[in-house]
Amino acid sequence: MRRRIRQPPPNNLKASQATAENRPAHIQEDLRKKKKGHQMKKSAFVSALSMGILSIGLAFATPQQAVDQLKENSTQVLNILSRANGGNANQVRRQAENYAIPYFDFARMTELAVGSPWRNASAAQKTALTEQFKTLLIRTYSGTMLEYRNARVNIRPNAVVRGRSVIVTADITPSAGGKAVVMDYTMYQSGNKYRVYNVAVDGASLVTVYRQQFNNTIRQKGIDGLIEELRSKNGA
């Protein structure tokens, strides 16, 4: 009796590939489109999930970070100002300015101060406005820095959240005593820090006060007239 030789089991992968290759061209094209569509849907889902995680991380950034940062900022500025000895006032003031400037968004402050005419300004005009307004603010407020080098600064622990903005309040009492100045810093999260884009002193908003002045100038002289007026005030 002859022994029957058992045949090896068919290779299912090769068989399926052969079957796929033998399918009509239009069916193969439909299958490729379905596979591509599935991959695109999967990619879109992953992207949406990543964006969702990022937005959740931003939305739940604790306002306590803004409070802690302002405490650190005020401590550092006061430490710098305490080095003033009468002969190095300008140097100390510049050091304090250089430390504080990165924590302010002067472009956004300028946009808010100019108001609706900002939309009609050219890119060059916006750049000039921002530079001149930044210079004006630094010149105006840095001059009083040394007067508060021994002030007591109390950062209130409870920040107010408004949309994506955080408002942190500081009570600044001069060393000579007297009534404390209440300052509200409106900030937003930018990377790993919060940046200030408005300051209210005893309830008076800085950008609102300047907006009234700027709008009067723009109505009379236009955007270029405002730029020239700021340059004149800055001694440029």
Image (spheres, helix red, strand yellow):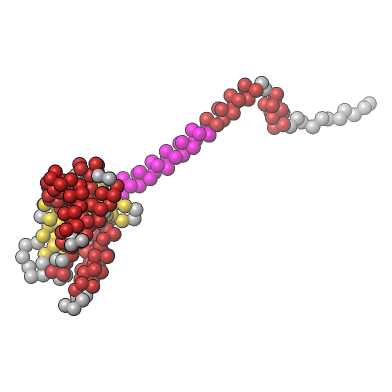
- Report the front residue among 213 and 104: 213
**Residue at the location (20% across, 49% down)?**
224
**Residue at the location (23% across, 73% down)?**
91
- Provide residue 147's location: percent of width, then percent of height: 13, 69
> Which segment did they paint magenta?
38-64
Above or below residue 42? Residue 123 is below
Q: Is residue 13 left or right of residue 139?
A: right
- Residue 56 in magenta stretch: yes
**Residue at the location (23% across, 47% down)?**
111
- Provide residue 194's location: percent of width, then percent of height: 28, 54
Quadrant holding the N terminus: top right
Above or below residue 155? Residue 160 is above
Residue 170 visible (yes or no):
no
- Provide residue 22's location: percent of width, then percent of height: 70, 24
Return the residue found at the far right: 1
Return the residue found at the far left: 178
Residue 26 visible (yes or no):
yes
